[in-house]
C-alpha cells in the first residue's frame, strides 16, 4: 500500500513544465483540426455530388462581403497573438474584441441575412446542403467567438504573458482553421456552377 501512496505523491509533486504542457496541447489541437477535415470534406463532397455543376442563385454581394469580413478577422486574430507575444496586452485585447466583432458580423451576414433570403431549407437538395454547410460552419464560428471572448476576459484578469499565452495561440489556430474552411465553402456555395433560381 505504501508503494502506491509513494507513486501518487510523486505524481502530484511532479509539475509539468509550461512548455511540455503546451507541446501536448498543440498536438491535441492539431489532431482535432485534422479530424474536422473529414466533416468539412464530407460536406463539400455532398455539395458537388448533389448539386453537380449547378448552385442556387445566392446574393453574390453578400457572399463577398461576409467572406471579406471573415478574412479580415483573421488578420486581427494574428495581430492579437503577435501583440501578446511582445507583451502588448492592450493591443492584444483590442484585437481580440475586433476579431470577435467581425465574427459576429459574419454570423449576422450568413445566418441573419442569407438565411432570411429566398432559399429555404425545404428547397430540395439546394436548401438542405446550403443550410447544413452554412449552419455547421456558423456553429464553429460561434464557438470561436466564445473562445475569443473567454480569452479576452482571462487577459483582462492578467492571465496571460509574453511567455505563457497558450490560450491565445489555441484560439488563433482554431480561428484561422475555421476561416480556411470558409475559403473552400465560399466558392463551392457562391461561385462554382450555373446559378439556379428556385
Image (cartoon, grey):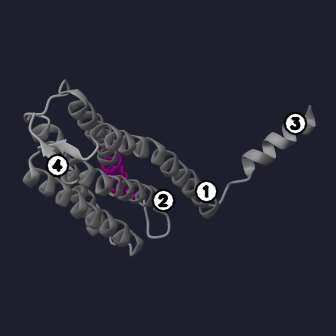
Residue at the image position 23 percent from the left and 53 percent from the top: 192
Task: Name the image quarter holding residue 124.
Answer: top left
Labels 1 and 3 touching (C-beta < 8 A): no
Instruction: State the residue lying farthest toward the top.
Output: 122
Name the spot of residue 107 as percent of width and height, x first.
Answer: 19, 44
Quarter of the N terminus within the rendering: top right
- Which span of residues is magenta-colored? 147-159
Reading the image, the residue beneath label 3 is 4
Name the spot of residue 148 as percent of width and height, x first.
Answer: 33, 51
Residue at the image position 29 percent from the left and 50 percent from the top: 185
Q: Earlier in the sequence, mark 4 or mark 1?
A: 1
Label 4 Cα neighbours within 10 Å, binned few <14 / some 14-19 / many ≥20:
some
Q: Earlier in the sequence, mark 1 or mark 2?
A: 1
Observer-side mark, 1 or 3, equals: 1
Residue 90 visible in the displayed image:
no
Reading the image, the residue beneath label 2 is 166
Q: Earlier in the sequence, mark 1 or mark 3?
A: 3
Residue at the image position 48 percent from the left and 51 percent from the top: 33
- Classify 198 as above or below 137: above
Task: Tell me the distance, in whole angstroms, between the alpha carbons under discs 1 and 3.
Answer: 25 Å
Residue 21 circle label: 1
Label 2 Cα neighbours within 10 Å, binned few <14 / some 14-19 / many ≥20:
many
> Would you say residue 156 sits in the magenta stretch?
yes
Residue 194 circle label: 4
Task: Tell me the distance, in whole angstroms, between the alpha carbons under discs 4 and 2.
Answer: 45 Å
Amino acid at each position: 500500500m505504501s508503494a502506491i501512496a509513494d507513486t501518487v505523491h510523486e505524481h502530484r509533486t511532479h509539475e509539468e513544465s509550461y512548455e511540455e504542457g503546451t507541446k501536448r496541447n498543440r498536438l491535441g489541437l492539431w489532431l482535432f483540426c485534422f479530424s474536422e477535415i473529414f466533416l468539412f470534406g464530407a460536406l463539400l463532397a455532398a455539395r458537388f455530388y448533389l448539386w453537380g455543376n449547378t448552385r442556387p442563385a445566392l446574393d453574390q454581394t453578400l457572399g463577398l462581403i461576409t467572406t471579406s469580413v471573415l478574412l479580415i478577422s483573421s488578420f486581427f486574430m494574428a495581430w492579437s497573438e503577435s501583440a501578446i507575444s511582445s507583451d502588448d496586452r492592450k493591443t492584444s485585447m483590442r484585437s481580440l474584441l475586433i476579431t470577435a466583432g467581425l465574427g459576429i458580423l459574419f454570423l449576422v451576414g450568413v445566418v441573419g441575412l442569407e438565411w432570411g433570403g429566398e432559399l429555404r431549407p425545404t428547397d430540395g437538395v439546394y436548401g438542405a446542403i446550403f443550410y447544413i454547410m452554412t449552419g455547421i460552419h456558423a456553429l464553429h464560428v460561434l464557438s470561436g467567438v466564445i473562445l475569443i471572448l473567454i480569452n479576452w476576459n482571462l487577459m483582462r484578469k492578467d492571465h496571460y504573458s509574453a511567455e505563457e499565452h497558450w490560450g491565445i495561440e489555441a484560439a488563433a489556430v482554431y480561428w484561422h482553421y475555421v476561416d480556411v474552411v470558409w475559403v473552400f465553402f465560399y466558392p463551392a456555395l457562391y461561385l462554382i456552377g450555373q446559378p439556379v433560381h428556385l
